[in-house]
Amino acid sequence: MRILLIVVGSLLLLLILTTLLAPPIAKSYINNHGEELTGRRIHIDAVRLNLFTGHVALRDAALYEDDGTTPFVSFDTLDVSVKIRKLLGSELFIRRLTLAGLNVRVTQRDTVFNFSSLIAHFAKDKEEPDEEMESSWVLTFHNVVLHHGQIHYADLGRGSRWDFNDFNLRVPDFSMGGEEATHAGLNLMLGKEGKLSATMHYDAKSNDFNSTIDLQHFDIEQVKPYLTDIMHVGTLNGHLGLHVDVQGNLSHITELLLKGSVSLDALHFGDKREELASCNHIGIDIKSIDLGKNRYHIGTIAIDGLTSHYDVRTDGNTFSQLMIPAPAKKADSTQTANTTDNNRKAKKAADFTVDHFLLTDAAFTYADHTLPDAFEFPVRHIKMEADNLRLHGDNAANITADLPEGGRAVIRWKGNISDWKERQDLLFIISNLKLTQLSPYLVAYLGQPFTEGTLSFRSRNSINHSMLNGKNQLDIYKVSVGDRRKDVEPQMKLPLKAALFILKDKDDKIDLEVPVSGNINSPEFSYMKMVWKTLGNLLVKVATSPLRALGNAMGLNSEDLEFLAISPDQFDFTSEQYYHIESLAKVMQRDSLIHVTFEQQLDASEEEALLQRADHRNELLRHHLSELGLPATRYEVTTVLSDTLDQPGYKIISKLEEEDL
């Protein structure tokens, strides 16, 4: 008994001495030999140890930067409680681990971090690793708590800084090497006002996990430095929020299942010159996203108060000037093609569905600075609504918008998104559009501005197998144009004033149908060029044959307006021929700008007597036109002798006279 008491007492004394002497010895050794251990200075203010309870505590500890004065990692308290007896069974059982006041400072410049020297220090002393053997130790953690931590990250090259403040982490249970389930909870302040919280559950047996992430009021300006590599970002503001539930298996980490919601408020985005877009609110309701099956089911996308603009300039457009061109990369075309083919075969086509899409109170401005006169066209109160939008299959959407000065636009669309060249149907209606808004384009194409006029426009365009078939119906009221601009070289020169005058009916209206058709895959295909070409051809026909254009409008036969058959031996006109002359005079009286030449066509071999009769007919025609009220300046009567005459008679040539032509 005496010997036993001596042994037990000696062991207790040894444990007591160890408990009393080990902390100051460990503290002194670490503080004095920190650089040998880690390559950096280490300072610990206090160490507490209790071998009887398995309790270890460190107070006011810091690992410094390479300069030896700036803390890299520091904390106020690290308090750990271990079950000593569990060590005998090859298990490290942590009953409690508390870390308070953690402060981590991470900096990066290019690819070098401020902890790179730590990695290098341990790497140079590391021997070649032995063949990996499975460890029999089990690590079990309970009640792991991190209080009021801070993590600061700065990318010195980009000028980016991320502050994770009031970092709080709680892990009730965590096991490595065992089969216990793991639970964890995290919350922290992200930036100035952002708040992030997350919970996670992990089943070690099945490798399944599920997590919930909640982010509130995150300022997206934080990501601005990372966009400067691809675009010229000037301003980026807005508050992001999300709530996402994630399920998956660590053995198949790419096959995640997600659902939740995302919102973005008070968005402002611009380049270094101006704001490009802003939005009051964007909300997305995620029904389910299955990454394994490449399936995306969105419940609702709601966008309110979106404002944007698109400018075309001689050196590019709004978005081409925003984006930074990517550096050219040389690649093996064969290898690239094979890789692309393999990717297409390996990955299933995306299945993307949106139950309901709603855009309200949006505004968009289109501006073209390539014209002689700058063109700016604002569209306000845009509303777009669509149900069951899909990448594959038929879709439908309705759009309404307000145009300047009381105009209105309506769009009805049906079509396929993924294969848009295969099938589309678009109905586009514009009502009460003031033509003066379009003057810059009229000046560019024809050299004259609109001074008055209202347009209603109905366009129906369909695409089937890349072939476009379009019908454009124009209803124009009280249109007028100004004088031709001397400082502009138009693409076409036409007597526009006279042509418009002829096209108007008695109610001062113009009804035109402009068909457009062609293969949209053709490199020379341009919808607007085809429209202008069709309109231009129409105006050319009006300008080159105004009698025919007016006569057709009056219901007269086109052939009677271009040729009057006669017999060379006629001394006078027949009653039918007089009727045709009077019809011509009525057409000429409709428009004072029409000038007509009556060319009497005769065979050059005719006898002198027949030539004299031809002169007599000319005099009768002049007299009759004068009696009908037409001044001599409006017409000309001549005789032309021909060796290859098909039919004798008067060839009627009409043209428009316009002062500024």
Image (tube, rainbow, N blue to C red):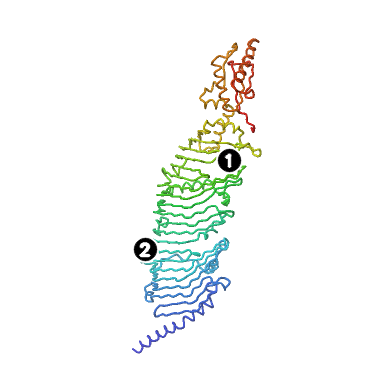
| Res. 238 visible in picture | yes
Instruction: Please report the residue visible at 40 percent of the width from the left and 63 percent of the height from the top.
Output: 200
Q: Are marks 2 and 1 in contact (CB under 8 Å)?
A: no
At x 47% / y 80%, what residue is drawn?
23
> Along the line of sight, which residue is nearer the eye, 351 or 179?
351
> Residue 538 versus residue 629: which sits nearer the camera?
629
Residue 203: image tag: 2
Whole-percent x and y of residue 289? 41, 53
Q: Position of residue 263 (x, y in %)?
A: 45, 57
Q: Secondary structure at mark 2?
A: loop
Label 1 belongs to which residue?
Answer: 439
Residue 137 appears anywhere in the view: no
Comparing marks 2 and 1, which lies closer to the viewer? Answer: 1
Q: Quadrant of the N terminus?
A: bottom left
Among the 4 quarters of the image, the one containing residue 283:
bottom left
Task: Please provide percent x and percent y for residue 288.
Answer: 39, 54
